[in-house]
Amino acid sequence: QVQLVEAGGDLVQPGGSLRHSCSASGMIFRINTMSWYRQEPGKQRELVAIIDSGGGTDYADSVKGRFTFSRDNAKNTVYLQMNSLKPEDTAVYLCSAYLAPYSDYRSHEYWGQGTQVTVSL
């Protein structure tokens, strides 16, 4: 069974840093794009960053220059380094991956469990 497991949520002061990780496990044939989303209560889910299989990245304007998305293909893990955090970055952060399991070799979307990031004094 394929799973995405996240780690790294925490309470941090404004200006601080956090690093999220998201690891894919199970019988995985190939991982394509992986993404980070965030969601605040009562608001739509927002795409924060995306990374393709070659390591190419794109970011929401609100996080450009502050967040860095990277991947370690050998470990099936991606990392979101978040610097210069602001109170408006407070949200539940969710990892998403389009990957193909060995069960059918077809790409499906999987989601992590979500982790809370709170930026506050």
Image (cartoon, rainbow, N blue to C red):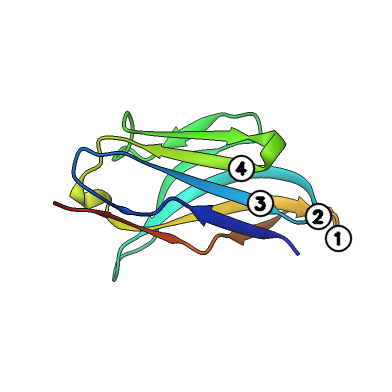
Identified by mark 3, the residue type is Ala
The x, y position of residue 24, in whole percent, is 66, 51
Image location (x, y in percent) of residue 61: 32, 37
Q: Say which residue label 4 marks.
A: 77
What kind of element bears circle 2?
Answer: loop
Q: Secondary structure at mark 1?
A: loop
On the image, the x and y values in percent for residue 80 come to: 45, 40
Neighbours of disc 1 within 10 Å: few (<14), some (14-19), many (20+) = few
* Mark 1 vs mark 4: in front: 4
Q: Earlier in the sequence, mark 2 or mark 1?
A: 2
Instruction: Name which residue type carries label 1.
Output: Ser
Residue for point 76% across, 64% down: 1
The crowding category of the residue bearing disc 2, from other C-alpha atoms within 10 Å (few below 14, some 14 to 19, many at least 20), is few
Dot 4: what SS?
Answer: strand
Which numbered disc, 3 or 1, marks the residue that appears first in the sequence? 3
The answer to whether residue 101 is above or below residue 60 is below
Mark on residue 24?
A: 3
| CA separation in Å, label 2 and label 1 | 8 Å
Asked which quadrant contains residue 66, the reply is: top left
| Whole-number angstrom distance, CA of label 2 to CA of label 4 | 14 Å
Q: Position of residue 17 (x, y in %)?
A: 31, 39
Q: CA distance from mark 1 to mark 4?
A: 21 Å
Q: Are marks 2 and 1 in contact (CB under 8 Å)?
A: yes
Mark 1 lies on residue: 103
Tell me which amino acid carries mark 2.
Met
What type is the residue that disc 4 sits on? Answer: Thr
